[in-house]
Amino acid sequence: MIAVTDSCPNCCRRGVEPIAVRRRGDAIAHGYQCPGCGHRWATSRLLSAYSEIHRARRHRDNSAAARTACDPTTGSHPNTAA
Ligand SMILES: [Zn+2]
């Protein structure tokens, strides 16, 4: 699990770790409480957005393998996909 730290929007303290993580569908929300000033806030991120970024990066880094490998998520072959 990757530690998702954030900066306090109130006092600008950096590296604040989440005190709560809640996943809802495609989104994951982190709740934070600043150990410096006690300010509380929350952020939410879309998991699907991250997976798209990772997929694009993988294809770019290893394009030759990506062209010949079947896509495990759909079972379709990239060469024959429209
Ligand atoms: Zn703070």
Image (spheres, grey):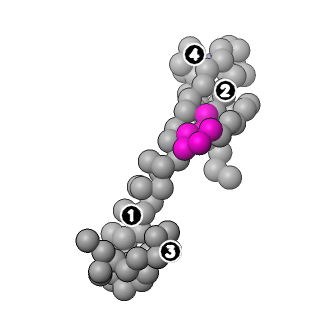
Closer to the camera: disc 3 or disc 1? 3
Rounded to the nearest whole Å, what is the CA distance between mark 3 and mark 1? 17 Å
Name the residue at 59% across, 42% down: 25
Rounded to the nearest whole Å, what is the CA distance between mark 4 and mark 1? 35 Å
Residue 57, which numbered label?
Answer: 1
Q: Position of residue 40 (x, y in %)?
A: 66, 18
Magenta region, residue range:
24-29
Which residue is the site of mark 4?
A: 11
Which residue is the site of mark 3?
A: 72
Which residue is the site of mark 2?
A: 32
Indicate the secondary structure of the residue bearing disc 4: loop
Mark 2 neighbour density, 10 Å: few (under 14) some (14–19) many (20 or more): many
User: In screen coordinates, is 38 left or right of 80?
Assistant: right
Rounded to the nearest whole Å, what is the CA distance between mark 2 and mark 3? 36 Å
Name the residue at 69% across, 22% down: 33
Rounded to the nearest whole Å, what is the CA distance between mark 2 and mark 4? 13 Å
Specify whether tag 3 is near ligand 1 (CB below 8 Å): no
For the question of whether residue 15 can be seen, the reply is no
